[in-house]
Every structure is written in C-alpha cells, then in structure tokens.
Image (cartoon, rainbow, N blue to C red):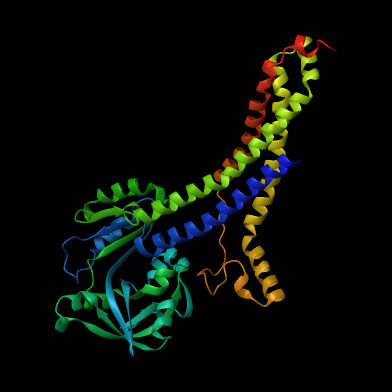
Amino acid sequence: MLSVIGIATGVLALTVILAVMNGLQLGFIESILEISSYHIRGEVPFAEPAALPPEQAISAIAGVPGVTAVLPFQEFHGLIQKGRSEYAAVIRGVPPDALSLDRGLAEKLTFESGSFALEEERTILLGAELAKRLSAKVGDRITLVSIAGLLGDPEEAVDSRFTVTGLFRSRFYEYDLGWGFISLEDSEKLEAGPPIIGIKIKNRWLDGRIANLISSLPESQGLKISTWRDYNRAFFGALRTEKLLMFVLVGLIFIVVGLNIFQSQRRVILERQEDIGLFRAFGAGELAVRLVFVWDGCVIGLTGGGIGLVLGLIIASRIAQIIDAWNNLIDFVLNLRTLGIFPSGIFYIQEIPSRIIPHEVVLIFLFGFFSAVLSSWFASGRVSRTRPAEVLRYE
C-alpha cells in the first residue's frame, strides 16, 4: 500500500505541476507570438520610414496555403507624457480593422475600458498598467514623442497629442506596462520603424516550410523573411530548460519510491526462500519465478499510476476553482487574502492557467509504472542465486 501511495503521489504531483507550468509558459509564448513577433515576418529593408508594405505582397502572402492572417504594421519606441508623468513605451501602428484581420490578436487583447477604436486621427490604445502609471483613462489627452527623433535632433522630434480610446490587458505584464497601439496612418507621420508584414499560420511548427513558400513568391522578392524561432530565442530556450529541470526534480520521487519497492521485494524474497526453493525443485525456471515478483510490481505500478493519473487530471482541469476555494477559505478564516496561493497583490496572475498535454500525461504514467516494474525486476535477481538443495536441506 505504501508503494502504491508513493507511485500515485508522484504521478499526481508531476501531472498537476506540468499542467500548470504548461498553462503559464504557453500563455507567455502565445502572447508573444500573437501580439508581438507573429509566426512569420516580412520586412522591407532599406525602406523610407513612411513607406508601407506593398499591397501586392500582402495579397499574395494571404493566398499562401496555411496562412490565416496578414497584418501590416510599423513599430517604434516613444515617450508618452501626461502632466508631469512620462513613460517610455513600444508603439505599434496597425490598421484600424486589425482585430478583424487578425483573430489571434483579438483573442489576446481584453479591454478594461474603452475599445479598439483607431478610426479617428490621433487616437491611441494603452496597456492598463501603463495607463495606471500615467494616471490616464479613456478620453484623456496624452503627448507621444518619438524617441528616435529625440536621440537624433531634438528640434526635429515629432510630437503629437493623442486621445486615449482604450485600455487593454494581454495577461503579459511587459505588454500591459510598456505597449501602445496607434493607427498605421498616424505612425507614418512619426519616426516609425521600417514597414513590416506580420503573418499568422495555422501550425506554427510549419513556419520554415511556409516561409520558403512566401520567399518564392514574385511579389515578396525584396522582403526579408524571418520566423518566430528567430525572435526571443533565449526566452523560449529558458522556458524549455525550466520545464525540463522541473520534470527531472519532481521525477526524483519515482526513484525514491522505486528504492522502497526494491527493498520491500528483497525482504519478501528472503521470507519466501522455502517456496522459491520448492518451485525450483519442481522444475520452475529462474524467469518463471522472477515473473511472480515482476507481476507484483506491475500491479503496484498500474494501481498507483492509475490512481495518481485520475486524481491528477481532475485537479489539473479544476486547478483554478481549487485555488479560488483555498483563497476564499483563508480569507474567511483569517481575513488575510495575502496568505492565499498566488495573491493578486503580489503576483500578476488573474487566474491559474492549466494546459494538459496528452503525450506528457502518458509519459508521466509510464515513468511511474516502469519505476515499479524495474525495481521488482532488479530485486528478483536474488532468485537466480537460490539453490534448491541448500534451501530444502533441512526441510
């Protein structure tokens, strides 16, 4: 029973931890891909700041199989001022109908107040945390200054008065604190960066093949094509390493449980020396006797792994409700919300995400199962050293 509980605990813990880690990491990755870097980019090199991507290239790229959205944009760093408050931010110029052109962007942006309204001239959308730093709200007027102009000739710096029409949240703190959106026409009038075509595809893992198809188009001959793997490479690599290390560290529980099973099986073998000697005397082979103990390990692995897997999937699929219930209990008993798990005053998390990946769940179950089976197999190796004549000499 202790071995079953140990296997179940390991499978349960690893399933829930990886589900929450997947939810957090994939949320960050998808926010970066859907809002910032896109799956594929096409840049116009050596273009004039005011030049926009050619319409022919945009139409041709939209017709490539696997492409779901094509969005032209420009990007630059600006200084936003309101009263005595000022803050640097990344400003992206997009078409006023960007949300209808790019459904992935529409799904990632939720508006705390206002809406995605860029139809009128000199309107701007601010991240909710950035607006809080500036004490800005919908309808306020702010001043936007291009940092590129300031670093060049301050007298030539272009500044404009913009009206705030929406405050958005992306669930990614960097964007909520340091991003703003203006219309593509307004970005042309400022010191905007080179024109870029942002491309979304159905399967981001096919980015290389689709990028080659786009590069082969006659209309895109002049565009510098790059994929999401070229952006934030260090960040994505750090997330992968973090997940691998967490898997290994939590997986150490299977080694501990495996050692316990190994010792318990060795004890059983010593207690059953007479039975083993009798089986061997009647002609049972070494493998046949070892399989008796291996079957015991299979039962332990299947039972513990199955129980842990079922409980882990239930908890992982309802982790947000469970944590909310815990926080409410702490708040009710102690009236201290800050003692809850991931208190909102400390962590920038609205809710705990969970993402269950099937092949990882199967791998966790197999880890638990084979830790019990292999431990039983190695423990039963003592059977090969059992000599029936010595065991049964005094029987």
* Residue drawn at x 55%, y 49% as measured from the top left: 357
Residue 37 in sight here: yes
Task: Residue 91 in the image: state x and y as whole percent.
Answer: 31, 73
Q: Residue furthest front?
A: 394
The residue depicted at 30 percent of the width and 58 percent of the height is 41
State the image quarter where residue 342 is shown: bottom right
Residue at image point 44% right, 64% down: 103
As displayed, is residue 44 above or below residue 99?
above
Out of 359 and 99, give the one closest to the viewer: 359
Counting the numbered discs, the total is: 0
- Report which quarter residue 307 is drawn in: top right
Q: Is residue 236 above or below residue 347?
A: above
For this rendering, which residue is in front, 92 or 211?
A: 92
- Near-viewer residue (152 or 101): 152
Q: Position of residue 298 (x, y in %)?
A: 69, 32
Taking the view exactly as shown, the residue that stands out farthest to the bottom is 83
User: In the image, residue 80 lies at what x, y percent?
Assistant: 31, 81
Quarter of the image that includes the N terminus: top right
Estimate the x, y position of residue 183 in percent, counting from the top left: 32, 76
